Image (cartoon, coloured by chain):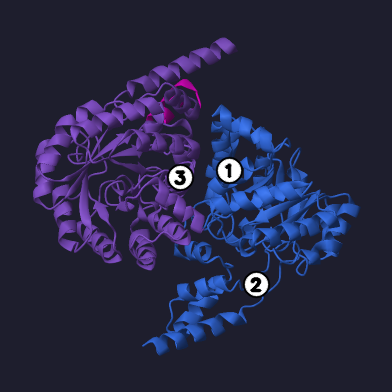
Chain colours: A blue, B purple
Amino acid sequence: MKGWVEFLKRKSDKPIKITEVCLRDGSHVMQHQYTEAQVRRVARELDEAGMHYIEVSHGDGLGGSTLQYGKSLVDEMKLIEAAVDECQNSKVAVLLLPGIGTVHELKQAHELGASLVRVATHVTEADVSAQHISMARELGMETLGFLMMAHMAPTEKLVEQAKLMESYGAQAVYVTDSAGALLPQEVKEKIAALRNSLSIEVGFHAHNNLSLAVANTLTAIEEGATRIDGSIRCLGAGAGNAQTEVLLSVLDRMGVNLGIDIYKMMDLAENTVGPMIPRAQEINRGSLVLGYAGVYSSFLLHAERAGQRFGIDSRDILIELGKRKVVGGQEDMILDVAAELAKARKLEV
Amino acid sequence: MKGWVEFLKRKSDKPIKITEVCLRDGSHVMQHQYTEAQVRRVARELDEAGMHYIEVSHGDGLGGSTLQYGKSLVDEMKLIEAAVDECQNSKVAVLLLPGIGTVHELKQAHELGASLVRVATHVTEADVSAQHISMARELGMETLGFLMMAHMAPTEKLVEQAKLMESYGAQAVYVTDSAGALLPQEVKEKIAALRNSLSIEVGFHAHNNLSLAVANTLTAIEEGATRIDGSIRCLGAGAGNAQTEVLLSVLDRMGVNLGIDIYKMMDLAENTVGPMIPRAQEINRGSLVLGYAGVYSSFLLHAERAGQRFGIDSRDILIELGKRKVVGGQEDMILDVAAELAKARKLEV
């Protein structure tokens, strides 16, 4: 495996940094019902294992605790404070989606000790992140850009948007595969393009809906991505993310040691996180269809309802929505698409 | 994605054939308690979806129903007969490990309608398969070789052993990643070497212990493997195999249609197989450690006991066993290794 390590070294000379996202992305799975005790225990054990960054926020980022996105059991600021309190070495990160969270919440999180922020926008809407990125830099936070639903944009568009985030002051830009829809060769192309076009670091955030999260992450690392997300026990939305303890074990097998204790991560997954998860993070029909169609997880229930109403398989609706690159906020399109499909089917008969 | 399809075509002109292994490899997970009704329903629905081959046998192959390997609830011959009875188009396959199963059981399975057999040996012991392969050919069965624990042999050794199987009359040879320990670049090397050295087809059987089963299978297909195994809902030993309905969805996204109905496979996974499985097939500490160490799943419990007795982490024992390439039947080595590690640790202190 030595050849592989040499290869890694050639594509980027920066160290690989892992962000554990189970306390943010996993908040969706927990239906935003994390208790302070849970967050404290997970953060403490991650810190003891040597995790680099721990992201703590509502699943939809700062300010996400609303009727629309799901009310948090415990105020995220209290959870951020608790995580910071438990960490000796790990840094606490937050997620901010402009439009959901505001600069006000970002300042508050920073005052409580969060030292890194990922400012996230849809892959074609980087321009809405300018103010937030610049404010985060002024606060002295490590500031990264997060281009969500990256599979929806051609690579040239992705590069253009990443350059915008770089120009606003982002210190890295992530390819964020929100729907778990990217195939390895697409990851390769997108990461390589960003690495060649940006002077800042490149990151990768996977979802496992097509069972490719760990493999896609390896591809991203091979192509020079150095900011890498994972969720322990796959505790993230949909089918989860790159399973952190698995990813670290594979990298170790390849001779890449990131200074994180693998045994401690395995124990944390088995004894702390596993028993906490309401349902095992296997790939079921729902998560598979989301990855296959390349759509938001929130579309699933809407499509099932629309399918019943129009007598159409919800999967056909989701696939059509994916083709049309329908995004969050356009949920009214779901009924339209179902009606169109039903009409087209009638014409066929 | 068109480039990828072209690429596939270049490496092999044979069609890709899928074998669903949940009724054999999944028998381990079911603790060999499959009922005839379960086998009938799964076989019928797989047949309706257009599955190419359905493997039905005890988890350890024909004749495996013993105190040592676990008693089957229902005689496997009855299950084979039931599956054959349900199938209009799918072919029923069996697994045979010389030493566990005999030519006698093979003949019986053939008479009941099984038309394909995989004759399986440890990766360095192909020579024990000569009689069984030749008998299967005489019976007129499609006869494939299965080289298990393929990660334990260097590629040259694997090629040598595959050539033996070819010389006995095997019509394809599988790289069988029994422990789910192979990394993508190792799969690439091994499949390419077999494709270049054999005139028969090459197959690949993955396990998901390192979350790489689907990705490794894509790599194998890319390198020209045409006989591919999967288990629906990941219902196979350890962390399961390449999850069949996921693999088919990914191939479809790449423009590769194998004539198997993806929606029917998704429904079968969700409505029939999912509710049947005693525990979700997520990657837990046990399955991860097996893949990381590259050892047999049966070693896990032994290593835990030995670890307790000698005050050693069972993972250190398993990793050492993997390094020494200890195989099934050598379980007495586990205590020896534990004792050695304990002694070495004492000397260090």
Q: Residue at x 58, y 12 (%)?
A: B348
Side of B159 relative to A49 (left or right): left
x and y percent of residue B39 in the render?
23, 57
| Residue B273 vertical position relative to residue B347 in the rendered view, above or below | below
Q: Residue at x 48, y 61 (%)?
A: B253
Residue B219's mark?
3
Q: Look at label 2 and name its amino acid.
A: Gly
| Residue A324 vertical position relative to residue B67 in the rendered view, above or below | below
Mark 2 and mark 1 lie on one chain; the one further toward the N terminus is: 1
Mark 3 or 2, which is nearer the eye?
3
Q: Look at label 3 and name its amino acid.
A: Thr
Q: Residue at x 67, y 61 (%)?
A: A148
Question: For the residue labelled by badge 3, is the local secondary structure a helix, a strand or a loop?
Answer: helix
Local packing at callout 2 (Cα closer than 10 Å; few below 14, some 14-19, many 20+) is few
- Predominant SS of the magenta segment: helix
User: What residue is disc 2 on?
Assistant: A328
User: What residue is disc 1 on?
Assistant: A218
Question: In the rendered structure, which segment of residues is drawn in magenta?
Answer: B302-313
Query: Is residue B311 covered in magenta?
Result: yes
Between residue B17 and residue B312, name the one nearer to us: B17
Local packing at callout 3 (Cα closer than 10 Å; few below 14, some 14-19, many 20+) is many
Q: Quadrant of the N terminus of chain A?
A: top right
